[in-house]
Amino acid sequence: MREPMELRWSVPPNNLPLLGAASSERELQRRYWRLAALLFFSGGLAAIAADALHRPAHEPTVYLLPALALATGVVCWVIADRASLRWLPALVALATLEIALTVWLVSQVFAFYYIMIAFYAAYVFRSRRQVALQFALASVCVLLPVAYDPEGARETVITAVVLIPTLLLTAGVMVHLRERLEASEERYRRLAESDPLTGVGNYRMLSEKLPEELDRHRRYQRRLALVVVDLDNFKWVNDELGHQRGDAVLRDVARALAGSVRASDVVVRHGGDEFCVIAPETSRASAEDLGMRLRRGLLAVRADGRAVGASIGCAVFPDDGDDVNSLLARADDRLRESKEARPGLSSSLA
C-alpha cells in the first residue's frame, strides 16, 4: 500500500529578489520612493554646499530650491509605505523641473544631475515610452535656458551637446541591462520551478504556490481544490519496458493532465509518478468534474498497448483542511481509498 505523502513546507534558502524584482508591490513601492528620497537629499545638499562655498554673496532666496528638494526628499521617505507607484512619473517630472531651476539660478554644473534622473527613470519604469518621455522632458529643460538667456546660450549649447547624448546613452544602457536581467530572472525562475523531465511545475512550485493560494482563498473566503494523482502501473513500465519508456510515459501523463485543466490551474510533479493539481476558485462539485476530466485524459496514456491507469484523490479548502498539511493529508487519504475501491472514482472524491 502506498505510504501517505508528507511535505515539509519552508521558505527556500537564498531566495533573494534580483534587481527590479521584489516579493511584493509594497516592497517595490518602498524601494522606489526611498531611492527617490535619497536623490532629493543628495541634490539638495549638493546645491547648498555649492552655493555656500562658491557664491557666498548670493541672496538667501537661492537656498529655497535646495530647501524644496530636501523637503521633497523628507516627504518621499515618510510616505514610502503608502504612496502609489502611479505617482512616480509625476515625481520624476518634479525632480527634473527642480534641477532645471537650479541650473538656471545657481550653476550649469548641476545639469549633470539629469544623469541621475536618467538612471532612476530607467531603473523604475518598465515602459520604454515612459523612459522616453522623461528623457524628452530632461532634454527640453537642458535647452530651455537658451530662450531666456541668449547671452549665455553658448555655455548652454555646449552643455547640451555633451549632456543630451550622455542622457540618451545612460537611459538606453540602463533599460537594456534591466530588460536583460529581468529576462534572465524569469528564465531562472521558470527553471527553478519546472520539472526538467515533464515541463510542469516541480516540488518547489508546489511548496510556494499552494500556501500563497490558501492565504488568498482564506482572505476572500473562497474554495480551492487540491487533486493528487498517482500512477497505478508505473512500476511495471519501468521494470518491463525500461526507464527510457518510463520517462516518455511521465511526459505523456504531464501533457494529458495539462490538457485537462483550466489556464488558472497549476499542474505539479512532486516526485516519482506523483502529480498534483492546484485548482483555485473550485467548489466540491467542480472538483469532481475536474477529477473525471483528469481520469478521461489519462485513459489515452498507454505503454506497450497497456493503460497506465491512475488513482485520484481530492480535498477541498476549507472543508477538508484549513492548512497545507491537513489538506494534502486529506487528499492523500482519498487517493488511497480510490486505490482500494478500484475502479470507482466516487469514493476518492466523496
Image (cartoon, rainbow, N blue to C red):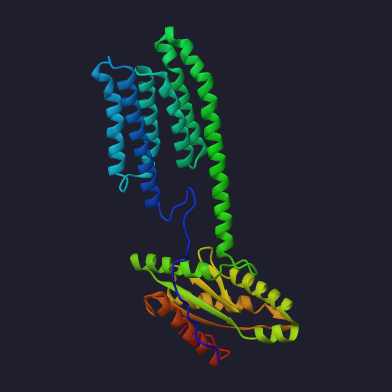
Numbered circles on residues, count = 0
Residue that lies at the very extreme toward the left in this rendered image: 60
Image quarter of residue 175: top right
Residue at (47, 13) in percent of width and height: 155
Residues 228 and 101: in front is 101
Residue 130 appears left or right of 55: right
Residue at x 55% of width, y 35% of height: 172
Residue 163 placement (x, y as % from top left): 50, 23
The N terminus: image quadrant: bottom right
**As rendered, which of 207 and 288 lies closer to the eye?**
207
**Residue 58 image point, x, y percent:** 28, 15
- Report x, y in % for residue 335: 51, 85
Question: Residue reaching furthest top?
Answer: 151
Above or below, comparing residue 210 to residue 232 in the picture: above
Q: Tell me if residue 139 comes above or below residue 293 in the rendering.
A: above
Q: Is residue 341 visible?
A: no
Residue 77 position in % (x across, y down): 30, 42
Identity of the residue drawn at 43% across and 10% down: 152
| Residue at 26% over, 24% down | 64
- In this image, 290 relative to 68: left or right? right
Q: Is residue 326 above or below residue 340?
A: above
Does residue 102 show up?
Answer: yes
